[in-house]
Amino acid sequence: MVHAEGVRKHYGKLEVLKGIDLTVERGQVCCLLGPSGSGKSTFLRCINHLEKVDGGRLTVDGDLVGYRQAGNRLHELRETEVAERRREIGMVFQRFNLFPHMTALENIIEAPVRVNGVNKSDARAEAQRLLDRVGLGDRADHYPSQLSGGQQQRVAIARALAMKPKLMLFDEPTSALDPELVGDVLDVMRDLASEGMTMVVVTHEIGFAREVGDTAVFMDDGVVVEAGDPRTVLVNPEQERTKAFLSKVL
């Protein structure tokens, strides 16, 4: 589903990604771990072309992300073409990014109606089903300001699912939450994983990565230091940098 070969990204002289090689198979949960500033979120944003790669190749479901190939050259797609492909990739941000002037249900139906042309009554029915799925069926008419952080994040997940994505990206989805609210969001993500949703998750939740992840990837300073089965990488890592990081967070 996701294949990265030598992906590089820089901002001026600062090289944030220094050649990322990574494969995520369909139906897998890949957890990206590492200290702040290691490039995890930047790489995640490159997957749906919110950030443009400066080198290497990145494909989602076999299609180049943000580019098309003609001969030996890559040509950047027009923004409308990028947006078309981005429809199939759901993203949940650290900050919930809900529209504050819309109710939970209105937030969820906005993209299916405006982008996909779904009939509004059908979109509302699907939105209610998704709210039920994330445990917020009785909050459809609540505005974001009337919801807790954990509830807002679950609405954000429902909003992403409303576009019926084939891939879900999560950028530290629990880091802005009070500790007691984290569990509800992780439970929704566990359910998605059990249903076979392909997920790439930037997280500091080591327990979630160990329990749910198919692959754990430890990044530092723009490179993949270590990757493999979470039960191995997180319990008996081979690299000293991984051991040092885990000794501080476990």
Image (spheres, rainbow, N blue to C red):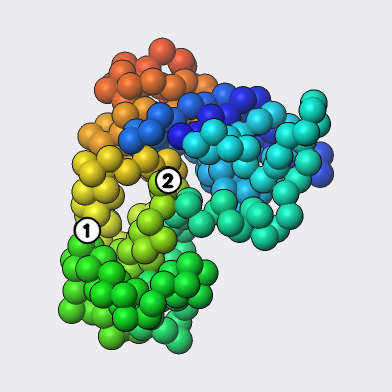
| Residue located beneath label 2 in the image | 167
Q: Please tell me which of labels 2 and 1 falls first in the chain.
A: 2
Residue at 27% x, 57% y is 185
Vertical placement of 143 versus 42: above or below? below
Given contact means CB atoms under 8 Å apart, are the residues at marks 2 and 1 in contact?
Answer: no
Q: In which quarter of the image is residue 81?
A: bottom right
Q: Where is residue 159 in the image (x, y as percent from the top left)?
A: 38, 66
Residue at 41% x, 52% y is 165
Secondary structure of the residue carrying numbered label 2: strand
Amino acid type of the residue tagged 1 in the rendering: Asp
Most distant residue in the top direction: 238
Q: Quadrant of residue 65?
A: top right
Q: Position of residue 125 (x, y in %)?
A: 26, 75
Amino acid type of the residue tagged 2 in the rendering: Leu
- In the foreground, 229 or 4: 4
On the picture, is 232 further left or further right than 81?
A: left
Crowding at dot 2, Cα within 10 Å, few <14 / some 14-19 / many 20+, comes out as many
Crowding at dot 1, Cα within 10 Å, few <14 / some 14-19 / many 20+, comes out as some
Q: Say if residue 217 shows up in the picture.
A: yes
Q: How far apart are marks 2 and 1 (CA)?
A: 21 Å
Residue at 67% x, 45% y is 66
Vertical placement of 144 versus 216: above or below? below
Vertical placement of 238 versus 208: above or below? above
Residue 184, numbered circle: 1
Q: Say if residue 147 shows up in the picture.
A: no
- In the foreground, 217 or 163: 163
Q: Quadrant of residue 109?
A: bottom left
Q: How many labels does the image show?
A: 2
